[in-house]
């Protein structure tokens, strides 16, 4: 079943940070859930009958798989309760980032469009394809998100 180990290390090293950031956005900064989701994405890559070739196809496959994995985990109420004693530890490794904090509070589609377009460098057309919507819709998500961020951050 897990036969596709050759080249996996290179794919993991190249794309883990990107997959983790996408998962982190979906789970609104819950690092443990984001880590679980990212690990699940790479397990799916290993278990795939024919994993995608390296390059942009692999990157796109991982992004779509990360989105679907996160949505599935959220639907199944995968998120565990965090005790009040542990709340202060959540997200400490990243430190406080006012902009990232504001992005995390955006609605899901706006948050994802901003993450793919601004943080990952995809064009609006590529973002639309990955999100399964029209390019103009992505422009609308980005416009609304920027407007909200400017207002919230006082820029």
Image (cartoon, rainbow, N blue to C red):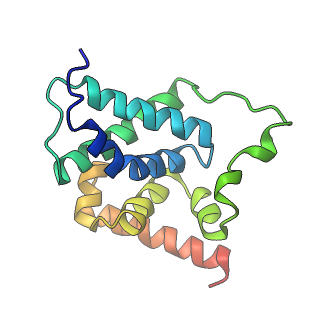
Q: Farthest residue toward the right?
A: 85
**Residue 35 rendering spot, x and y as whole percentages:** 52, 38
Query: What residue is at 20 percent from the left and 27 percent from the top?
Result: 4
**Residue 129 rendering spot, x and y as whole percentages:** 23, 53
Q: Quadrant of the C terminus?
A: bottom right
Image position of 88 with respect to 125: above or below: above
Query: What residue is at 52 percent from the left and 51 percent from the top?
Result: 25
Q: Quadrant of the N terminus?
A: top left
Query: What residue is at 71 percent from the left and 52 percent from the top?
Result: 92
Name the foreground residue: 125 vs 56: 56
Name the foreground residue: 7 vs 25: 7
Left or right? Give the position of 74 relative to 84.
left
Image position of 96 with respect to 55: above or below: below
Q: Quadrant of residue 150?
A: bottom right
Q: Quadrant of residue 96?
A: bottom right
Residue 23 visible at all? yes
**Residue 8 rendering spot, x and y as whole percentages:** 26, 36
Query: What residue is at 44 percent from the left and 55 percent from the top?
Result: 112
Q: Quadrant of residue 42?
A: top left
């Amino acid at each position: 079943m897990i036969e596709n180990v050759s080249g996996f290390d290179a794919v993991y090293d190249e794309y883990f940070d990107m997959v983790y950031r996408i998962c982190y956005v979906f789970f609104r900064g819950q690092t443990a859930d984001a880590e679980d989701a990212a690990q699940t994405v790479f397990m799916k890559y290993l278990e795939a009958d024919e994993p995608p070739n390296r390059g942009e196809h692999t990157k796109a496959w991982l992004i779509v798989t990360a989105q679907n994995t996160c949505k599935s985990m959220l639907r199944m109420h995968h998120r565990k309760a965090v005790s009040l004693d542990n709340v202060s530890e959540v997200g400490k490794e990243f430190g406080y980032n006012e902009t990232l904090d504001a992005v995390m509070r955006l609605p899901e589609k706006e948050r994802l469009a901003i993450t793919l377009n601004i943080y990952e460098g995809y064009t609006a057309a590529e973002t639309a394809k990955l999100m399964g919507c029209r390019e103009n819709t992505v422009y609308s998500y980005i416009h609304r998100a920027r407007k909200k961020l400017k207002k919230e951050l006082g820029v």
